Image (cartoon, helix red, strand yellow):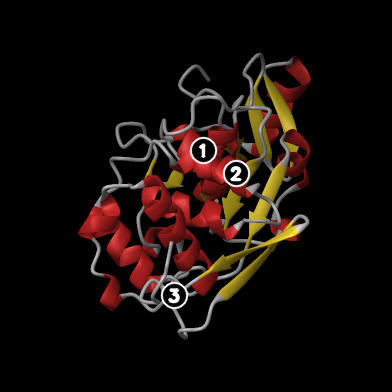
Amino acid sequence: MSSLPHGMPVTSRQLENRGISRQLAHRYVRSGWLVSLGYGYYLRIGDKLTQTGAVAALQKQGVPVHIGGRTALALRGFIHYLPLGKETLFIRGVPRKSLPEWFLQSFPIDTRVGRLFQEGEKPEERLFVSSLKAEEPASPLTADPERALLEMLDDVPQKQNLEDARKIMEPLFTLRAEAMQALLEACTRIKVKRLFHSLAEQLRLPVLDALKLERIDFGASSAYVLSLQGESLVLKHPGSKGHG
């Protein structure tokens, strides 16, 4: 039992692979060694369920989710003022109704299922999604910072305040140009691409100078109007005169 990963639930099948039958697992629950979360998931007694451990457990069971957006940026060290564990857990890939009840009751969860990029459907086929900590087998698949940034901008303004997004984006001077280029070319949403360009230009992020904008589809030359609370933000085509 001591070899079970901390913060990560295990399933009946995983326990069986360790020589613990379902009957023995029930006995461990009655004896106080395991806690049953429901739906065949268990947690070692005294262990504390973590966001990363919970998502990793779902991924082990084939649930096609990854940690994205603001949560991914925080976990990768790009946001320092969010209280992890209390903040909403942003995941992408499946609707809320497809997630087990124990998961939904454990954390504030936000899910998105729309295709933001042209890519494969499985988490391992998604662009710039990788293990949070490659050296840890129980580490969940998490959006790389470049992808996480675009996922966060996709949430503006419905779930993400624009000014907070700007503050989060302001210190991102180490964004990789190759990753950003590939993601912007594969991105399916004009709003996200124009918003990224507008903010990156305002913040003078170095990555913008390295991008080949002519290879990115920013939509028609007309302006894109983003409705915010009480006002509108006009996102012009990067090739339009008078932009900025």
Look at the picture and state if 12 lies above or below 121: above
Q: Which residue is mark 2?
A: 163
Query: Residue 118: x, y in percent?
Result: 42, 75
Q: Residue furthest front?
A: 242
Query: Residue 181: x, y in percent?
Result: 29, 64
**Residue type, mark 3 in image:** His
Asked whether residue 62 appears in the rendered view, the answer is no
Q: Which mark is residue 167?
A: 1
Residues at discs 3 and 2 in contact (Cβ within 8 Å): no
Lower position in the chain sequence, tag 3 or tag 2? 2
* Of marks 3 and 1, the one in the foreground: 3
Q: Quadrant of residue 243?
A: bottom left
Which one is in front, 24 or 139? 139
Q: CA distance from mark 3 to mark 2?
A: 21 Å
Which one is in front, 237 or 186? 237
CA neighbours of label 3 inside 10 A, class few (<14), some (14 to 19), many (20+): many
Locate the C terminus and report the quarter of the image it occupies.
Answer: bottom left
**Residue type, mark 2 in image:** Glu
